[in-house]
Amino acid sequence: MKTTKAAKSTPVKPVAKKAAKKNAQKATAASGKATGVAKKATATIKKAAAASKKAAPAKTAAKKAPPAKTAASKKAAPAKTVAKKAAPAQAAPKKAIVESHAALVRRARRINRELAEVYPYAHPELDFENPFQLVIATVLSAQTTDLRVNQTTPGLFAKYPTPEDLAAANPEEVEEILRPTGFFRAKTKSVIGLSKALAEDFGGEVPSRLEDLVKLPGVGRKTAFVVLGNAFGRPGITVDTHFGRLVRRWQWTDETDPDKVEAAVGALFPKSEWTMLSHHVIFHGRRICHARKPACGACPIAPLCPAYGEGETDPEKARKLLKYEKGGFPGQRLNPPQSYLDAGGIPAPPLGAG
């Protein structure tokens, strides 16, 4: 019996307990590791889910972006259409052209030839019968129209037909006649002084030399060239406001001083063409190439003009801007040349008519 109790000795239980404890610890450790792995896996899944949530709006935004682009393009489209429609309505003025002097000469002379075909009846638009009437009328044309001068001079020359008559005139009576031309007091002083100079220094005759003409009261180079070219047949360039405006538009010169304009343009043409060139340019300036609204769409020299597009380019609208015989209206002379009448020109009405 003692031996059996010895075989059931107590040392066996502690060993079993230790083994069980170790196994339990191992199981707990394994379980802990498994839990840790599971936690890590869960965290990873959560992070992935969060990332996918963040990515989703961006993806959605990317999907929504194309409509925004489409909207922008739709808004831009009308502007583009307007630009296309607007282009034909009004051409932009041409920029400065670069050409050699020889090319400029060729273009300038071609313009003059074209204008000669358009205005074969071009003439001085002041009524006159002799050099004295022309020089007086030209002096009176300052700051007024040739038409108003032509309507005024018949009464003046009927009462004072010669330089001697006008030199001895009563200034107040002359002022009353010249009142419609504006600045009538200053003009009265000029024409009476001019007439006295003709009577006293030139025997009552208008001189035919430039150096003599410019000595007369109220006579400058412009007036002198009008008289020389149209009363004596001596070539000269008349630089009035129309002439200066057009030659700058055509880029014949950029000068503004009349004497410099005269020199620059004169160098482009033979001297024999100067007088008629002046008439062609001035006629064109009064009828088509106006200061404020040139009728570009009705201009015969548009292909040669660097300033094409400054005015109305629509042909129908441009035709409505034409003046004098080109527009079917009376001209500036009461007694125009027969060639003008033959071309369809209409004489101007006398002062007070209509």
Image: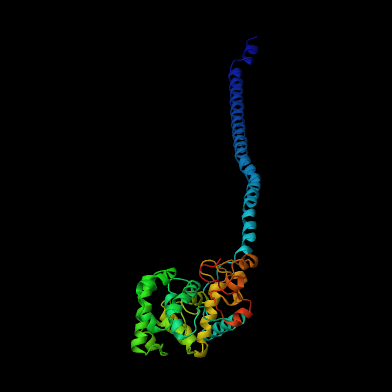
Above/below status of 42 relative to 65: above
Colour theme: rainbow
Specify whether 151 is left or right of 170.
Answer: right
Above/below status of 229 relative to 69: below
Q: Is residue 285 visible?
A: yes
Pick the residue in front: 354 or 85. 354
Residue shown at the point (61%, 55%) measured from the top left: 79
Q: Residue furthest front?
A: 159
Pick the residue in front: 250 or 130. 130
The x and y percentages for residue 44 are: 60, 36
The x and y percentages for residue 267 are: 47, 87
Tally the numbered discs: 0
Residue shown at the point (53%, 71%) measured from the top left: 350
Above/below status of 293 relative to 40: below
Tell me the quarter of the image containing the C terminus: bottom right
Above/below status of 17 relative to 340: above
The x and y percentages for residue 29 are: 58, 29
Residue shown at the point (35%, 74%) measured from the top left: 171
Specify whether 223 is left or right of 9.
Answer: left
Q: Is residue 119 visible?
A: no
Q: Residue furthest top?
A: 1
What is the quadrant of residue 50 in the picture?
A: top right
Tell me the quarter of the image containing the N terminus: top right
The x and y percentages for residue 133 are: 45, 82
Pick the residue in front: 61 or 187. 187
